[in-house]
């Protein structure tokens, strides 16, 4: 059995003259959750569209469970589940009627109650869709996506607009699907969601993958942060320990963040400098960047020419 569920090789996708995806590649192993992160317009949904077989790539190759999702659609479509950003439901149908309607054209579908049970909506079976909360609608989306017992699940921003508790409930559902061996490709703007759920992730910007891998590798792709406070110093009074001037230093009031790929050496310089001036570095910390810092770094510094 092929252990790679999703393969993307040198994928390019254009809309007319505009190249929205510019040569990306990644693989997702069976049973893994891979998160595609990125700035607005980075090309995440476009990538998902190609993987879901809505149109063939302009250039490059994609394979789902070893199959071309356009040319071999019949071999693979029923093995995929899809949750789109915007799902259209008939508000007058009940939850149960909605699932029953989808069951009619789903091969080997779960029973309605079983599908609703998977997402914790059994008790809402007789409620009209128009009366569901946002979180319950997302659960219904998930129930429909898993109706055909998919091996690969595409989730495009599945928790956007939900309150923190509803988001956590959806995370639990996703974890349950992973425990069942389902492979998940997730796009999200919530970095904590990716940190919580993803085995591996990629950050896209302007059609390219800028950094990719397990979380630790993605965080290691940017320098270590030395952070401290220096009451009395701010902005234009920026003090520089010799040698630190070559580093990127972010100042926010009296809070300083130095980004470095030589933390030990720079910390020594900083401590010597502070000691010589009898300055106390408040809240001194040496740490890896957060995913948010890596993301912002990608968004701000990696301008990519067309
Ligand atoms: N049908 C289309 N025709 C022309 N341009 C499009 C079309 N769909 C998307 N684009 C453009 O392609 C680029 C990538 O869009 P895409 O929706 O894939 O980005 P995204 O990463 O999903 O963004 P977001 O996070 O905002 O959802 C954007 O510049 C977008 O304007």
Image (cartoon, rainbow, N blue to C red):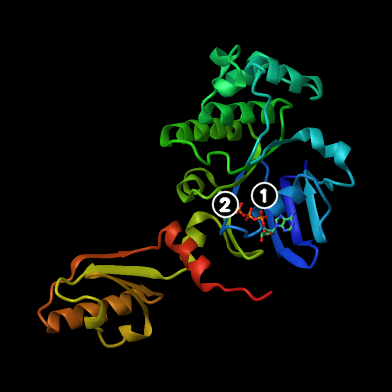
- Whether label 1 touches label 2, CB < 8 Å: yes
Instruction: Provide the residue designation for mark 2.
Output: 200
Between the C-alphas of marks 1 and 2, the distance is 8 Å
Choose between 157 and 279: the one closer to the eye.
157
Above or below, comparing residue 93 to residue 9 in the picture: above
Above or below, comparing residue 196 to residue 226 in the picture: above
**Residue 273: % across, % down:** 19, 83
**Residue 242: % across, % down:** 27, 88
Residue occupying the far right of the picture: 71
Q: Is residue 189 left or right of residue 43?
A: left
Above or below, comparing residue 172 to residue 184 in the picture: above
Give the tally of numbered discs.
2
Q: Is residue 79 left or right of residue 174?
A: right
Kindly identify the residue that appears in the image at 44 percent across and 58 percent down.
292
Q: Is residue 261 left or right of residue 83?
A: left
State which quadrant residue 57 falls in: bottom right
Instruction: Provide the residue designation for mark 1.
Output: 28
Above or below, comparing residue 220 to residue 279 in the picture: above
Choose between 264 and 56: the one closer to the eye.
56
**Residue 1: % across, % down:** 78, 41
Q: Quadrant of ligand 1?
A: bottom right
């Amino acid at each position: 059995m092929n252990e790679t569920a999703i393969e993307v090789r040198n994928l390019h996708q254009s809309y007319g003259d505009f190249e929205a995806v510019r040569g990306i590649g990644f693989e997702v192993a069976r049973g893994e959750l891979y998160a595609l992160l990125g700035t607005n317009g980075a090309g995440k949904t476009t990538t998902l569209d190609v993987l879901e077989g809505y149109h063939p790539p302009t250039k490059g190759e994609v394979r789902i469970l070893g199959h071309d999702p356009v040319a071999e659609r019949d071999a693979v479509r029923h093995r995929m589940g899809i949750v789109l950003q915007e799902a259209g439901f008939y508000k007058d149908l009940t939850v149960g009627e909605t699932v029953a309607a989808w069951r009619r054209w789903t091969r080997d579908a779960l029973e309605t109650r079983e599908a609703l049970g998977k997402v914790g909506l059994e008790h809402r079976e007789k409620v009209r869709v128009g009366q569901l909360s946002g979180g319950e609608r997302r659960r219904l989306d998930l129930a429909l996506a898993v109706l055909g017992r998919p091996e690969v699940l595409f989730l495009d921003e599945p928790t956007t607009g939900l309150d923190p508790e509803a988001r956590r409930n959806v995370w639990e559902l996703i974890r349950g699907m992973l425990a069942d061996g389902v492979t998940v490709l997730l796009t999200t703007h919530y970095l904590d969601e990716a940190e919580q759920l993803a085995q591996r992730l990629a950050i896209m910007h302007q059609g390219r993958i800028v950094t990719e891998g397990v979380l630790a590798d993605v965080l290691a792709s940017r320098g270590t942060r030395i952070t401290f406070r220096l009451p009395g110093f701010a902005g234009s009074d920026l003090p520089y320990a010799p040698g630190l001037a070559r580093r990127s230093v972010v100042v926010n009031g009296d809070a300083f963040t130095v980004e470095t790929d030589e933390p030990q050496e720079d910390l020594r310089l900083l401590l010597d400098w502070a000691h010589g001036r009898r300055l106390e570095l408040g809240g001194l910390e040496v740490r890896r960047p957060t995913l948010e810092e890596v993301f912002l770094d990608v968004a701000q510094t990696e301008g990519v020419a067309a």
